Amino acid sequence: MISRHKRNTDPMHDSSRCGAKTRSGFPCRSPAVSGKARCRMHGGAKGAGAPTGNSNALKHGAYTAEKIADRTEFKRRLDALLEKNKSLVEDLKNTDASNFWK
Ligand SMILES: [Zn+2]
């Protein structure tokens, strides 16, 4: 007897996949834990990874959340400044600078 029930497996197949390299050399392909890039067996499990604020491997602090946020904010402000003065920058690019040194 054949069931006429249509299986809806599309959301399952559309879910993001784990890309961890397995012992066979191919990616894992198990569904990734929501909000993470890895499956539960490859580091996506709850509690996996270093605890927040762990500084055991801290060497110079250039990649702390605070420093990354500082750089992001600096880039955002620089982009805003460049956008604001776009015409000025274009004028400078089109200016023949050789006249300034005579
Ligand atoms: Zn995996």
Image (cartoon, helix red, strand yellow):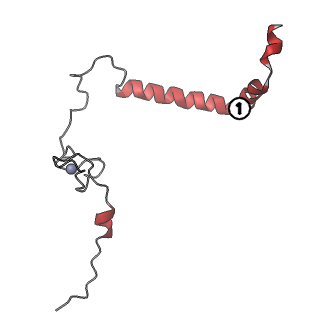
The structure residue drawn at horizontal position 68% and vertical position 32%, both measured from the top left corner, is 84
Q: Is residue 78 left or right of residue 5?
A: right
- Residue at the location (59% across, 31% down)? 79
> Can you identify the residue that label 1 sits on?
86
Q: Find residue 70 and report its horizontal and vertical position in percent.
A: 45, 25
Q: Residue furthest top?
A: 102
- Residue 68 appears left or right of 46: right
The image quarter containing residue 68 is top left
- Label 1 CA crowd tier, 10 Å (few <14, some 14–19, many 20+): few
Q: Tell me if residue 79 comes above or below residue 40 in the rendering.
A: above
State whether residue 78 is above or below residue 29.
Answer: above
| Amino acid type, callout 1 | Lys
Judge from the rendering whether residue 42 lies leftward or rightward of residue 19; answer left or right: left
Residue 15 versus residue 75 in the image, above or below: below
x and y percent of residue 61 in the render? 33, 19
Image position, residue 20 (x, y; %): 24, 46
- Residue farthest to the bottom, as pictured: 1
Residue at x 26% of width, y 52% of height: 32
Q: What quarter of the picture does the C terminus occupy?
A: top right
